[in-house]
Each structure stands twice: as C-alpha cells, then as structure tokens.
Image: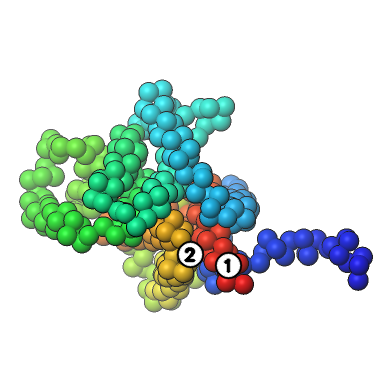
Amino acid sequence: MSAVFDNPSRLNRLSPMLHGFDIPLALAVILLAAAGMITMYSSGFDHGTRFVDHGRNMVLAGVIMFIVAQVPPQRLQSFAVPLYMAGVALLIAVAIFGITKKGARRWINIGIVIQPSEILKIAMPLMLAWWFQKREGQLRPLDFLVAGALLVVPVGLIMKQPDLGTSILVLVAGFSVIFFAGLSWKLILPPVLVGVTLAVLLVMFEPMLCAEGYRWPILHDYQQQRICTLLDPGKDPLGKGFHIIQGMIAIGSGGMLGKGFMQGTQTHLEFIPERTTDFIFAAYSEEFGLVGNLFLIAGFIFLVLRGLAIALEASTVFSRLLAGAITMIFFTYAFVNMGMVSGILPVVGVPLPFISYGGTAMVTLGAGLGILMSIAKAKRLVQS
C-alpha cells in the first residue's frame, strides 16, 4: 500500500487536475466538436489538409482549455490589468505600423505575426470583471461610466482596423459584464429603441440610402455595402449578394433531413463561398437539413445554459461576471454566424464555434472554455 503512495500512477497524479471538471459542459463541447469534424471532412474535401488542420486546432484548443482550467479564478484576476494593457498597447501599435492585408490593418509582427484584437475577446471581460470586483458593494454611476470608457477604447481601435466582426464580439463581451454588474434597464432601453427605429427607417428608405454614390457617416464603405446587400442581395446576385444568396439556397435545399453526408451539391460544386470558414453552416445545413440544424442549435443552447448556470453558482463577483461574459461570447459567435448565413444579419466574418476552420478563433474558444471550467472547478472544490 505504501508503494502506491510513494510511486503514484500517472492517473493518480492527473486526478486532482481532472477533479471538478464540468462534465455537462465538456459533453456539449465534444458533441459540437464532433459535428465540426464531420462537416469539415465534407466541406473541406478539396482544401488539402483542412480536415487534419482542423483536428489539430481542436486538440490545441483542448490543451489550452485544460491548462487554463488549472488556474484558479483568483489567479486569473491578477492577469486582468496587464493583459488588458498589453492588448490595448498592441492595438495602438497595429494602428501605427501594423501589417495590412486585403485592405485591413489587423496584424503586427512581434517575432511572430499576431492579431491583437483576439486578445481583447478574453482581456476585455477579465478587465471589467476585475473592475467591478474591486467596487463590490459600493457601485456608483461613475463606475459604470469608467467601465464604458474601458470598453469603448479597444472597440474603437478594432473598428478602425476595420474589423466589424471582432469589434462586435469584444463589445458584447464587455457589455455583458456591465449588464450583469447591475446596469439599469432605464439606460439600456433608449439605445435599443434608437437602434430599432434606425433599422425600421433603413428598411423604409433602403432605395435612397443604398443608392450608388450615397455614403453613410461613421461606417466604412464595405460595412455599408454589407448592410445594403443584406436588405436586397438580388441587386448584385453575382457580386456582393452572391454569398447570402448561395447560403440561403444551400440551407433551403437541405429540406427536413438533408441531402446526406458528402452529398451536398451546393457545397461540392463550390457554389458556397468560404464553405469551410464563415459559411460552413450552409454546407452543414445542406447535408443534414432541419433535423441536423435543430441538433446543432440544441447543442449551442445547452452550452449557453450551462455557462450561465456556472455563472449563477460562482462564489465571487469576479467569477460570476467573467463566466457570464464568456458565455455570451459563445452565444454571439453562434447567433451572428447562423444569422448572417441565413440572410437575417449582415456578413461580418464571425466563425461558427467548433465548426468553422480557423486556428486563432479556436485558441480563443479554448481559453474561454478553460475559464468556465476553472470557475466551475473552484465552486465544486469549495463545496467539497
């Protein structure tokens, strides 16, 4: 018996690390990842090593999740300020001497080429959760204004690159923390009503606002074109409207049960643009139909509900706000991607979690899952 304790097996050494892992959350992710691998095999059949690379990215995300899950929430809190400051500093550096690709300046070479805006997807909720934790029990309106300023600075820098998709994700992550911290509905409803009013006016006056040569303030030309294309993709069916039209055709042609694995004609005849990345949901829908979509949506709903449950059970303000914000990032990823592929939201370049190809996004998702696991683990260890 003493030999067992003197020379513990590898499993015994790993068991403290695995103890407290949230099994329901892990199962939801495994099912979604399996759906992603199946879809990638079909949609990436002629994309060289896309399937293998996607599997490698998932393994990397799993390793990152496991490592981050070992860091207790109190330790994560100590990373909030330096990570946020480093992220903002890198965004400023990108604006000054970043690398430009396809008309966007989003990358910087610091020995390796990175996209600093990805850091803010995690750094932003960390920073704001830290801010509100420090002011627990003594919140004032000024504290919410400071939080708003901390959010606006990186979001503005990311939009300037321009990168509307990432800026939306960072905005949602930060605003979720502010909302869960107790922001009054009286302050939320006015901008929501203004947004709804503007959307209605946009639909009513679309012919004039989307006329050739008419320029909107604030938005970049490509962002204006995406919104106008959403309102009427048929105006340019072989150009700017091609993505949306082909996506909707693929989703509709899948019917109830889909055409079957590897049988998607829109996918395999290459009518769907970006079928392994932003528009992979169209390829999935064509082959697995409405039933497959309901399975996928149910998986994401369960993931979000489990994340919110972890947030509600968290023992500190920091953990609760951080878990809630990370969960809302997953929700926004899925909702925006499915919405833009279905033609109800503008195309903004947001991947579908665990399904779309992309190493950077997968690393971010792995880190986010690790944070949720860390918070769930801390709660269970306290209870035991």
Outermost residue toward the front in this view: 138
The image's mark for residue 93 is none
N-terminal of the pair, mark 1 or mark 2, is: 2
Kind of residue at badge 2:
Ser
Q: Quadrant of residue 279?
A: bottom left
Q: Position of residue 25 (x, y in %)?
A: 53, 68
The residue that appears at 41% across and 26% down in the rendered structure is 93
Q: Is residue 226 above or below residue 330?
A: above
Compared across the picture, whether 200 is left or right of 155 comes to left
Q: Are marks 1 and 2 in contact (CB under 8 Å)?
A: yes
Tag 1 residue = 382
> What distance separates the C-alpha of mark 1 from that of mark 2?
9 Å
The residue that appears at 7% across and 51% down in the rendered structure is 205
Q: Position of residue 148 (x, y in %)?
A: 28, 45
Label 1 Cα neighbours within 10 Å, binned few <14 / some 14-19 / many ≥20: few
Outermost residue toward the top in this view: 97
Q: Quadrant of residue 285?
A: bottom left
Given residues 238 and 57, the one toward you in this image is 57
Is any part of residue 370 visible from this angle? no
Q: Position of residue 134 (x, y in %)?
A: 40, 49
Label 2 Cα neighbours within 10 Å, binned few <14 / some 14-19 / many ≥20: some
Kind of residue at badge 1:
Val
Element type where label 1 sits in the image? helix
- Location of the N terminus by quadrant is bottom right
User: According to the image, what is the colour scheme of the structure?
Assistant: rainbow
Q: Is residue 258 above or below residue 37?
A: below
- Location of the C terminus by quadrant is bottom right
The image's mark for residue 315 is 2
